[in-house]
Amino acid sequence: MSKYYVVIKRHALRLLISLTILLFFILHVTKFIEWDFINALENKAYDVRVRLTMPNIVDSRIVIVDIDEQSLNEIGRWPWNRKVIANLIEQLFNTYHIDVLGMDVVFAEPDNSSGLKQLRELAQGPLKEAKRFSEILKTLETELDYDALLAKSMRNRRIVLGYAFPIGQDGAQVEAGKLPPPVFSREEVQTYQLNYITANGFAGNLPEFQANAMTAGHFVFTPDPDGIVRRVPMLYGYKGQLYESLSLAVARAVFGNPKIKLGVVTSESSYHNLEFLKMGNRNIPVAGNIQTLIPFQGSQGSFPYVSASDVLNKQVKNPEILKDKIVLLGTSAAGLWDLRATPVEEIYPGVEIHASLISGLLDNRIMENPNYMIGMEVSLLILIGLVMIIVLPLLSPLLATVGTIIVFGFVFGLNINIWTQMQLVLPLATTFLLMLTLFLFNMSYGYFIETSNKRNLTGLFGQYVPPELVDEMSNNLGREFSMEGESREMTVLFSDIRDFTSISENLALAPKELSQLMNEYLTPMTHAIHHHRGTIDKYIGDAIMAFWNAPLNDPHHARHAIDTAMEMLERLKEIQLKFHAKGWPEINIGIGLNTGIMNVGNMGSQFRIAYTVLGDAVNLASRLEGTTKQYGVQIIVSEMTKAAVPEYLYRKLDFVRVKGKVQPVAIFEPVGLHGQIALNVMAEIAHYEQALEHYQQQHWPLARKKFARLCEEYPERFLYSLYLKRIENFIKNPPGDNWDGIYTFTTK
């Protein structure tokens, strides 16, 4: 007993850190915290298993009639006229006797390529009296109405049309064509609290096509964050109703159009979880947002391909390849933009994704990823993690390496067995990463504990800079940084709580509680500065002073400083919520930024020394912070900082001469990054700039009118009322023709 006690005591810190590592992985799996890079690795691990286990045989039950390069060369560029499509359908059903046709294309607009519309306009206009023309036109109308020909070719045939729910319309509702009847009505959907993807518009087929086709299904794919298509929404929401995918609609057509039912499991807390869709005697597993994992048949070419031009020209070499088959009309041509990135290949025809899904639905070969897999993954993490945590410290490096490789093999074999035999997706990357992390930690534990460079640097700079910069310094010891004084271009930030003195006097807080308040404010603000590579100069009561581009060189110091200021405002919102919950007063801050030449280094006396910055550029930043309350804004940057960061959109505040400086400076408020600004904000700034131009040119009536309108539309913007008061004063007391537009501050 004493022997094990000694071992545990000796490795107590190592065991504690290892258990913490295990805990973090468990928290990730249970979604308390999420690491994007683990999710990305999990996706890659999924892709590897897909490639290892897919059948890789040609499924001849499904044939792709391909609008390929050959077809485009022979028939012409896409879209073809509807007469060609009608002829294609006639050939498929009458000549080649196919069973079901799914169309991975949409016909949302009328086809006027025949010239019928123009001929009708002539018959009703210039040639209205030409009876012979009207008689000939009447005989040609049937042949020239390509849409009617296509609609007629669809009648009484098992044809499933495709349509789209457009993505990324910025809230704009676009409705083109007509949707098929929903699989589930609004009343049915409202019965359960289902999560599904909602569209804000659709691109459907013309009503005459939808009326003559058997049904239709959407061909929308939902790529993962890495751009890879791994799943398809089997049901898509629009106006509270659910619509089926193209693959599901084709499979239903093959099985006699059975009604889809929801496989909903209701917990004791009345929470509804949709686990599968029931189609006849088949269960189709679904996960988040009613999506199904794609059961890839293999690489491109896993289904027979027939050129559309060969079908039209009756030149299919083996007609039996199409007889009684499920046919999908789609494209593999690069110019038609239906190529997707998939786990199988980076360039993969979208139509073959539909084919893989239909094949999987026919064979009941859809992978499941149910919620209870989280419990299985956590159990495996705990089992593997505890074994490695206990055993690795006791083994030599060689035995630890061999043992870890054996455990890797066991976990992979178990995972593949569950995948192939049970059709369950048990996450793999998290377990692998845990094992690798524990192995590397134990192997390098002594090395990192005994590293001296980082420890020495932490003693010098740890109180100023974030740990990430300390790590960089340890890799560049003696080359890129120094504590000796030097001049360089830098950006400095001053931040201060407004009216903090009166707040603290009126709070009646105990000293301990006031200290707690300051800690809860300063800690997240410091995190924001460190997150963007800033160096803390000092805390001055409630004020913060920080700078960039020292001790390590940072060519983007101005951008990092503005990013920090914007993040500080975001963190302030979270702080205010916490303060409100504790009954503490709401606080607001002002932030000033300036870029320029400054002196940086160890400065002080023989009694006390500090790593800090000095210079006129530093003083200006301090003055700008104090000026924020004069303009009712939270951040003010100088024209030098603005020039260094053109990626941001700014609101020009004024041209001022701050107290203690002779040279005037233009000051600005950063609004946000270009491309991320709402249109209404852009419009507001444009109107403000017009008003400011009239003000600077002493066009007082026009300036007053525009600022009055801005005050009316944006009463919360103190800046506009400030200028309105100035204008009223200048109307009564004109500044004169020599006025340069500079406003001089006489106070800090």
Image (cartoon, rainbow, N blue to C red):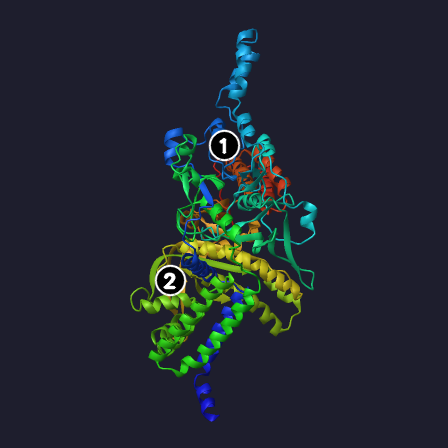
Amino acid type at mark 2: Ala
Residue 605 vs residue 543, the one in the foreground: 543
Residue 670 vs residue 369, the one in the foreground: 369
On the image, the x and y values in percent for residue 636 come to 50, 51
Q: Disc 1 marks which residue?
A: 94
| Disc 2/disc 1 C-alpha distance (Å) | 78 Å
Residue 592 vs residue 117, the one in the foreground: 117
Q: Earlier in the sequence, mark 2 or mark 1?
A: 1
Q: Secondary structure at mark 1?
A: helix
Is there any visible trace of residue 86 in the rendered image?
Answer: yes
Crowding at mark 2 (Cα within 10 Å: few <14, some 14-19, many 20+):
many
On the image, the x and y values in percent for residue 653 come to 51, 45
Q: Is residue 264 left or right of residue 658?
A: right
Amino acid type at mark 1: Asn
On the image, the x and y values in percent for residue 559 come to 43, 53
Q: Which mark is residue 550?
A: 2
Name above or below for residue 360 compared with residue 697. Answer: below
Tell whether label 1 touches label 2 (CB within 8 Å): no
Q: Is residue 633 left or right of residue 77?
A: right
Going by the picture, which residue comes out furthest to the front? 320
